[in-house]
Amino acid sequence: MNDASTPSTPSTHPRFRVLLLRVLGAELMVWILLWLLQSRYAS
Amino acid sequence: MHWINWAIVIAWLLYVSIDGIRRSRGTNKLEGYFLGGRSLPWWVVGLSVMATQLSAVTMIGTTGQGAVDGMRFVQFYFGLPIALVILGVTIVPFLHRAKVYTAYEFLERRFDAKTRSLTSVLFLVSRGLSCGTIIAAPAVVFSAIFGWPVGWSVALIGVPTVIYTMIGGVQAVAWTDVKQMVLVVSALVAVVIVLLLRIPVSPDAALHIAGAAGRLRVFDFNFKLSETYTFWSGIIGGTFLMLSYFGTDQSQVQRYLTAKSVDEARSSHLISAYWKIPLQALILLVGVLVFVFYIFVSPPMYYNPAQDRAVRAADPAAYAALDTRYRAAFNARQQAARAVAAPEATAENRSAFALSEKAMVAVRTEALKTAEAVTGQPSKDVNYIIPHFVLSELPIGLAGLFIAAVIAAAMSAVSGELASLSSTTVIDLYRRWVAPDADDTHYLKVSRAATGLWGVFACIVATFAATLGSLIEVVNRYGSFFYGSILGVFILAMVPRAGANGAFVGLILGMSAVAGVNHWAPEVAFLWYNVVGAVTVVTVGLLIGGGRAQNSGARPVTISE
C-alpha cells in the first residue's frame, strides 16, 4: 500500500472509513451520555 | 500517614522496580532495548500509551480541576479519537514499515539532516524539562503534606523509575505501565465507590447538587478563540494537538513501533480512541464528587497545610476571623444544598445554592490572597484538594493505594519519556553525528547511560522546579509554539511535491507565526497554536516546494544496520 517514502493519505485508505465510523460511533455514544448528564443535572 | 498505607506504597514501588528489571531479558540489542524487539502485544502497547499520558498531574491536578471547575475540561480530548483514526492509516503504518527507531529519523529520509536534527533537538529540550515537571508536581505536593524536603519526594519517584528504565528499556516501561494502569484505574473506581457511600445524600441528589453548582456543564458550543476549553477548540485544536502528539512525538511513536505488526500498532491506538474520554470523564467525576463531599463535611480553608501554617502563624487573630466567616459560609451552603437534594427542590432552591457557593468561593479567594501576601508565593491549591481528601477521609489501605497510584502515574509517564529521550539522543544525535559506525554493544551502553543522564537531569529540574518555575513555564509555553509546526512538517512529508527547503523554512516560519500570534493576540487560547503552526508550515512548504530532497551524505536509516 505504501512505498518506502510516502505514507498514504486517509481518504485513499480502504480501512479509513470503517475505522472512522466505528470510532466516531463510539465517541458519539460518549457525547450522548455526557449530554444526558448535563441536561438532566446542569440545566 | 498510617504505617499500613506506607507499607502499601513501598511494596508497590518494590514490586514495580523488580518487575521492570526482570524485563531486561532480550534487551542486549539496540532493537530490543528501544523497541522491545518489535514484539509486544497490541493491548500492552495500548495500555502503555495511555499510561504515558496519564501522569500524576492527571491524578491530583485534573481531579482537583474537576472539583473547582467541573467536567468541561473533558472537551480538550474530543479531537483525540479522530486524530488516532487518521494516524492509524497514515503515519502509523508508514513509520512501522519504515523500520525506523524514531519519528525524526524518517524526516531525514524524506527531507534532510537539518530538519531531522532541528525537530529532534526541539523534542529533547521540551521533553527533558517537561519530564522534570512531571516529577515535580507530585513531589511538591507530597513535600507540603508530609513535611519532607522536595528532594526526598523526587528521589521516591525518580530513583526506581530511572533504574528500571535504564536496565529494562522500553520493554520494562511497557509492561510496568500495564500494571500501573491497572492500579490507577482500580484506585479511581475505589475512590468513586467510597465517595458515593460517604456522601450523605443519594447519588442522584449528589449529581443535582453538582449540577446546580455548574460542575456538570460539559459542552460549551461558543466559538471563542480566547476560551481554552470549548467544543470547537477541542474538536479542531485538539485534533491538531493530538495528531502532533501521537503522530510525531517520540514518547508516543516509540511505543507503537514496539508492536508486532501494523495492525497491532493500529489496534493499540484504538484503546486510547475508545477509552481516553471515558477515563478522563471518570477522573473529573472523582473531583466533582469530592466537591459534593466537602459540601457536607467541613473542608479546610487551605488545602495546602504549609499555607495554613504560614497564615496562622503570621496573624492568628486575622486567621481566626477569616475562619469564622468561612465556617459560616460553609453552613449556609450546606443548608442550601440540602434543599437542592430534596425531592421537591425548586429552581429557587438551585439559585439560592448557587449564590451560597459564590459566597463560599469569595471567602476562600480572600483567604488565598492573604496566603499569597504572607508567603510571597502563588497560592493556587487545586493540586492539594485530592491529596487532602485521600489522606484525611479514605480508609486505611485505600489511602495508601491511592498514593501508590499517584506515584505509579508519575513513574509510568516519566519512564516513557526517559526511553524516548534516550532513543532520540542516541539515534538522532549520537549515532547520526558522533559515532555512525559503532556496534550494537556500544550503542546499548551509550543508550543506558543516556537514560540515566536524562533521569538525573529530570530529577535535578524537579528538585529545583520551584526556583526554576518561570524558566519551566517559558519552556512549556515555547513547547506549544512548535508542536503544531512539527506536525506541519510530517504533513508535508506526505505530499510528494514538498521538498527539504520548504519543510525547513516552513518549520521556522510556522514557529514564528505562533510566536507572532502569542505576542500580538495573546488572548488566543493555546490549543489554536497547533492549527496556526501546522497550517503555516504546510502553506509555506507547498509554496516553496522544491522537489524531493536527496540524502546527501546521510546514512540510510534501516533496522538492519
Image (cartoon, coloured by chain):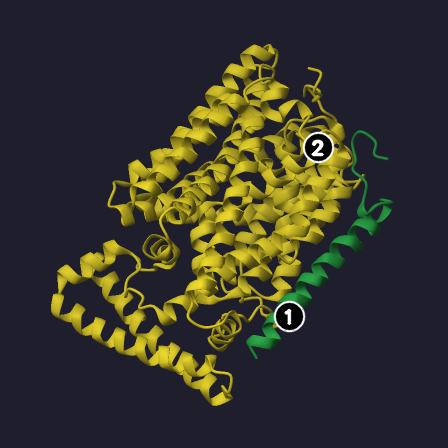
Chain colours: A green, B yellow
**Where does the image place residue B401, in percent across and percent down from the top left?**
42, 45
Examine the rendering and report whether any part of residue B70 can be seen: yes
Instruction: Categorize mark 2 by other alpha carbons within 10 Å: few (<14), some (14-19), many (20+).
Output: many
Drawn side of residue B249 relative to residue B59, left or right? right
Subunit that carries the residue with mark 2: B
Residue indicated by mark 2? B111
Label 1 or label 2, whichever lies nearer to me, is 1
**Where does the image place residue B413, in percent across and percent down from the top left?**
50, 39
* Kind of residue at disc 2: Phe
Above-or-below relation of A17 to B125: below
Drawn side of residue B262 relative to residue B328, left or right? right
Q: CA distance from mark 1 to mark 2?
A: 45 Å
Q: Are marks 1 and 2 in contact (CB under 8 Å)?
A: no
Are the residues under marks 1 and 2 on the same chain?
no
Q: Residue at x 46, y 50 (%)?
A: B59
Drawn side of residue A10 relative to residue B317, left or right? right
Q: Residue at x 73, y 40 (%)?
A: B266
Drawn side of residue A14 relative to residue B115, left or right? right
Examine the rendering and report whether any part of residue B454 can be seen: no
> Which one is nearer the viewer's eye here, A17 or B3?
B3
Residue indicated by mark 1? A35
